[in-house]
Each structure stands twice: as C-alpha cells, then as structure tokens.
Image: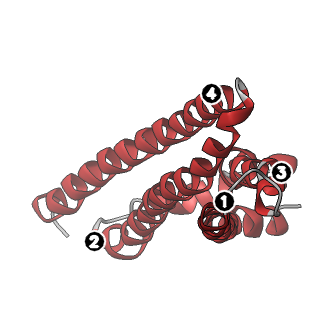
Amino acid sequence: MTSDQEQGPLAEFTSLRGETAQLLSFMQNLFAFQITTAGTIFSLALSNPTRTRLLLILPFTSYALFARYSSCHFNTLRIAQYVRDELSPRVSGGLRWEQWLDRSHTPVRFIVWVNPHYVAFPGVAALSEAWTLSSVFPGAGLSISGHVLFLLVWAAGLSATIVCFYLVWLTTTRARGLARTQV
C-alpha cells in the first residue's frame, strides 16, 4: 500500500480519536453533573421534612443520565472495534492502538469491582427510594389518590433504579473481563 492510500485511514483514525476524546469528556461531565444534581436534591429535600418526596426525582434523573453515559461508553467501544478491525488492516504495519491498550491495560482490581458508578448513579437512586419508603405505606399523611399516585411514582422509580444498576453492570463487563484475564 502506498503512502497516499494510507492517508485516508490515518485521517479517519485521527478523526475517530478526536470523537473518542469528546465522548470521554462528555462522560466526565455527566458524572460530575450527577454528583452535583444528587447533592443538590438531597440537600433541598432533607432541609425540610415536607420536601422529602422530592427525592423521588433522583431515580429518574440517575437513570436518564446514566443511560446517556452508557450510550457514550458503548460508542467508544464501537469506535475501538472499528479501528482495530477496519482501519488497522488498511495501514501497512497496522495501527495497533487498540491491541496495545488491551495488552497494556492492567485495571486496579478493587476499582473494577467496586466501581464508583454504582454509588453515583443507581446507589443514589436506591438511597432516595429507601429514604422515601415510609411514604409508600398508609398513614404517611396522603389522601387515598395521593397515596396511589405516590406508590406508582415510587414503583416506577424502583424500576428505573433496577435498570440503572443493570446498565452500570453492562458498562463494567468489559473491565471485569480484563481483570479476570490479568494475573
């Protein structure tokens, strides 16, 4: 392959590395926004006992933010696979960036298994669900219709929390696989 024939794949690789950097930056921003949002809502809700039910916002925001986070995560994995499978063979000698990352990456096992995303996203949602659990039962100062509505919102929040736990598990599967193969 001539140098001219390699310019296209190399330019595409450069572009994809830039896209990956943007995705990673966006993921960091989502994480920081989740921490800020959770802290703000907890502070507001716990500053006055009448606002405790505001915590029910957190399962939905946690799910929505982590769904976007996981979308970015999986897009970076798709880019990596494309670079490895499609671009690298079109450059003499290959690009080998993804292969090098796979070989040289030694995750800190504790961090791989005790991932902060579990705490920041579904953990916050689960805590807010637990904190508002007493309002699910009769005698929480709600009318019958208010109680039914609260119960429906609480159950939907629990569902969002479970899905959020699953999404975090999916995004960490690759890291757990690497930890098992590294001795």
| Mark 3: amino acid | Val
Q: Nearer the viewer, residue 73 or 123?
A: 123
Mark 4 neighbour class, 10 Å CA radius: few under 14, some 14 to 19, many 20 or more: some
For marks 1 and 3, the one nearer the N-term is: 3
Q: Which mark is residue 114?
A: 3
Viewer-nearest of discs 4 and 3: 4
Image marks 4 and 1: residues in contact by CB distance under 8 Å? no
- Is any part of residue 53 visible from this angle? yes
Residues under labels 1 and 3: Cα distance?
A: 42 Å
Residue 182 in which image quadrant = bottom right
**Residue 127 coordinates in the image, percent (x, y):** 78, 48
Q: Indicate which label's residue lies in the foreground, 4 or 2.
A: 4
- Asked whether, in this view, residue 83 is left or right of residue 129, the answer is left
Marks 1 & 2, CB-CB < 8 Å contact:
no
Q: Position of residue 99 (x, y in %)?
A: 55, 63
The residue carrying mark 1 is 143
Counting other residues with Cα less than 10 Å from the Cα at mark 1, is it few (<14), some (14-19), or many (20 or more)? few
Q: Is residue 144 left or right of residue 83?
A: right
| Residue 46, quarter of the rendered image | top right
How far apart, in angstroms, are the residues tagged by discs 4 and 1? 24 Å
**Which residue is identified by label 2?**
90
Q: What amino acid is found at the position of numbered circle 1 in the picture?
A: Ser
Q: Is residue 45 above or below residue 82?
A: above
For the residues labelled 4 and 2, the Cα–Cα distance comes to 56 Å
Q: Give the residue type that dot 2 points to.
A: Arg
Percent across and percent down for residue 78 are 42, 69
Mark 3, secondary structure of its residue: loop
Residue at x-position 67% and y-position 26%: 43
- Mark 4 or 3 closer to N-term? 4
Which residue carries the number 4 mark? 44
SS class, disc 1:
loop
Label 2: few (<14), some (14–19) or many (≥20) C-alpha neighbours in 10 Å = some
